Structure formats: structure tokens, C-alpha cells
Amino acid sequence: MQYTKQQVIDYLVARGDADKAAKAEADLPAVVDTDSDPELLARLDVQPEDLMGTHPPGPAGLGGQAGLGDADRLAGPGEGLES
């Protein structure tokens, strides 16, 4: 699987790990191929599943899967985006 450096950085920032995000910025190539060099992500404590959306950071209980399409479901009564 291939991921851009920016995808890895964005994931690290989203989980609150600014130090590792800075390390990723400095150390990673423009494209990270997890098949040919799995250690690149492992050094940053990132698993490929994290970047695939299986374990992204997000609101507790939602598994990080909340998106714009979920605004009505997440909003309280009368607070939805669509009227």
C-alpha cells in the first residue's frame, strides 16, 4: 500500500503527536510504500491500518468514522445541518 508523506503527517497531527509529525516531515520520502519498507511507519508508531481508516483518531465511540455526512446523526434534536 502507498501513502503520501502528507497523509502520515496529517494522521500524526490528528492524534496529537506533533513531535512524530515533525520527524515524519524530515525523514519520510514523498511516498511511503508499506510493502517495500514497513519500517518507515513502524518507527513513527503508525500501522498501515491507521492510515486506511480502520483506526484513525476521532471522537470516542465513533471509531474516527464521523464525516460530514454524519452531521445530522451526531447533532442533537433540531441541530442538524439539513432542514
Image (cartoon, rainbow, N blue to C red):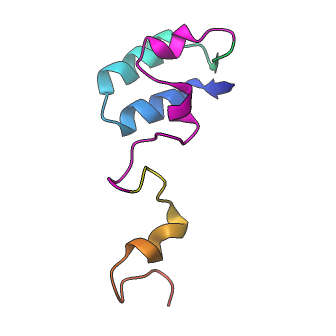
Whole-percent x and y of residue 10?
Answer: 46, 35
In the rendered image, the vertical position of residue 67 relative to residue 29, given as above or below: below
Residue found at x 42% / y 82%:
80
- Left or right of 64 in this view: 39: right
Whole-percent x and y of residue 73?
Answer: 45, 75
Q: Quadrant of residue 22?
A: top left
Residue found at x 61% / y 27%:
4
Q: Main secondary structure of the magenta part?
A: loop
Q: Quadrant of the N terminus?
A: top right
Residue found at x 46% / y 77%:
72
Residue found at x 46% / y 80%:
81
Q: Quadrant of residue 75?
A: bottom left
The region drawn magenta spans: 36-61
Of all residues, the one furthest to the front in this rendering is 61
Count of marks, rendered view: 0
Whole-percent x and y of residue 70?
Answer: 49, 68
In the rendered image, the vertical position of residue 79 relative to residue 3, given as above or below: below
